[in-house]
Image (spheres, helix red, strand yellow):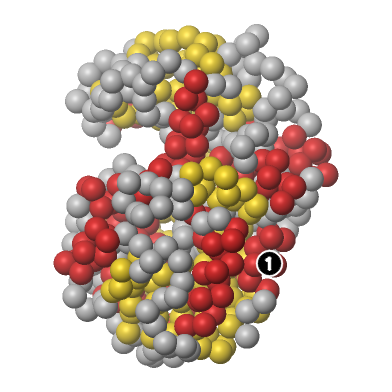
Amino acid sequence: MRFIRLIQRVLNWRLARIAGPAPKLSFVGHIDGLDADGVAGWACGANNGAATVEVLLNGIRVGTTPCDGIRPDVEAVGHRRQSGFHFDLSGVLDPSVTNRVYVRAVGSDDLLPGPAVIAKKNIRESMRQEGFDFSNSLFAATAYTYEMNGSSAVVTGEVKSNGAAPTTIRAIDGGRLVSVEFQKFDSNSVLRAFGISTYSYSAVFELTDAPCLRFDFANPNQADLRPICAIPGLGGLTTFVPPDESRERVVGTMTSNNYITLAYSSAALLWTFVEGEGNEGTWLDWGCGPGRTAIPLKRVFAKNWNIYGCDVDELNIKVLNRLDVNIPTKLIDLYPPLPYPDNMFDVVHGISVLTHLTEDTQKLWVNELARVLKPGGLALLTTHGELAILMGGFVDEQAIYPAFIRRGISDEIIDTALVTYIKDSAYYRATFQTNANTRALFGRHFDITRCIAGGHNNHQDLWVLRRK
């Protein structure tokens, strides 16, 4: 997932003062629990070898512990049974600050995914004074992966809510819900401080012969905030996964299964806003990459639409051209103009593009998107807002949080995902901006129809805009 990759890059930047990187070895694992008493999870070598993890507190190594606890749940999915760990944190945390706990396997420089932040006690009050507000309903969800079993699929994912817990999942089309289980867990103490709860889910669907299963989440008093998730149905499209080098630039170290799941969910979500626009039209995927969203849109959802793609990454443009010849693409410059005439498109979407641009570059591109979009046309764009700041644990990160509060945007940190692949090594950023900043960015050219906090992939804010 791009957000996890982004967090890891920022954290690695923070940890640069630690002695040189360990040799790059291959490990798998996860942080499952984190509180004032300790951090727990599992890790093992990718070949199921034994592992030892080291624990870093606020950038400083505080110790190591072997991964030798019995984990039947981990064994059940094909990993080492003796892989669990627990590290005692009692007595070493600083209650006056937000504590960040990082874990990595000895022999690797990659941080284990999972919760990383133990908030200071007054974080909710201090952040509210600085402009954070989650008084409105929050209900964000994503599907992470699926497994096929004959005509059935088991889908797992995550839901975040500051209101009522999800009560069920509803199949929109492509299948019938057989069963679902929700489990509440504590993933981030900053989120908990704002009343945001996290739930994992596992749902079993009986599939029909439709190419795609779409489902959403029923929740009391939150009918307008139901997020859409999707997976391929029986005979569905699974042949658009790009090569590893291409995928790494877009989503980091993500499995093919995860890639397909997130691709379908992203395309299905966008389609819910577009399907009422008519049976055909012109649609631009701005920052298309290797076609993660464009291909399922073209082949499954928006078959009668003319979908175009453009990107600054030449490799991924070539990959998309090989994967689907029916999506015309353009390699574009880092700055406008786009190689399209005025008022060409009915719809433009940009997923995780503004999240990597400086404030000045954002303004240039928003102006340009307005130029190529027809009056009344629809724009669907994502940003990293308050929820992303909270989820990433950046609430007192000195290179991010002060600028976020003072200027309404933090665009100082360079994201190295494309640093060697584009002309300007300082162009691609890790950008976070407030809701107010983003409204001002869009307000000149667009009417803002909706902003859904965490509406895309459980962390990026999704903006639904109409060209004035």
Residue 212 appears in the picture as rendered: no
**Left or right, 337 with reference to 75:** right
State the residue position of label 1.
439
Task: Say which amino acid is labelled 1.
Answer: Arg
- Tag 1's secondary structure? helix
Residue 135 appears in the picture as rendered: yes
The one of 312 and 180 positioned closer to us in this rendering: 312
Picture quarter containing residue 105? Answer: top left
Above-or-below relation of 208 to 458: below
Q: Few, some or many C-alpha atoms within 10 Å of disc 1 (few <14, some 14-19, many ≥20)?
A: some
Picture quarter containing residue 327? Answer: bottom left
Q: Pinpoint residue 383: horizontal percent, then vertical percent.
A: 56, 58
Above-or-below relation of 83 to 66: below
Q: Pinpoint residue 174: horizontal percent, then vertical percent.
A: 33, 70
Q: Pinpoint residue 278: horizontal percent, then vertical percent.
A: 44, 90
Q: Residue drawn 68% across and 74% down?
A: 443
The one of 180 and 7 positioned closer to us in this rendering: 7
**Left or right, 437 with reference to 269:** right
Q: Residue drawn 46% across and 30% down?
A: 12
Q: Residue drawn 32% across and 46% down?
A: 420
**Left or right, 54 with reference to 151:** right
**Left or right, 323 with reference to 311:** left
The one of 208 and 102 positioned closer to us in this rendering: 102
The one of 210 and 188 positioned closer to us in this rendering: 188
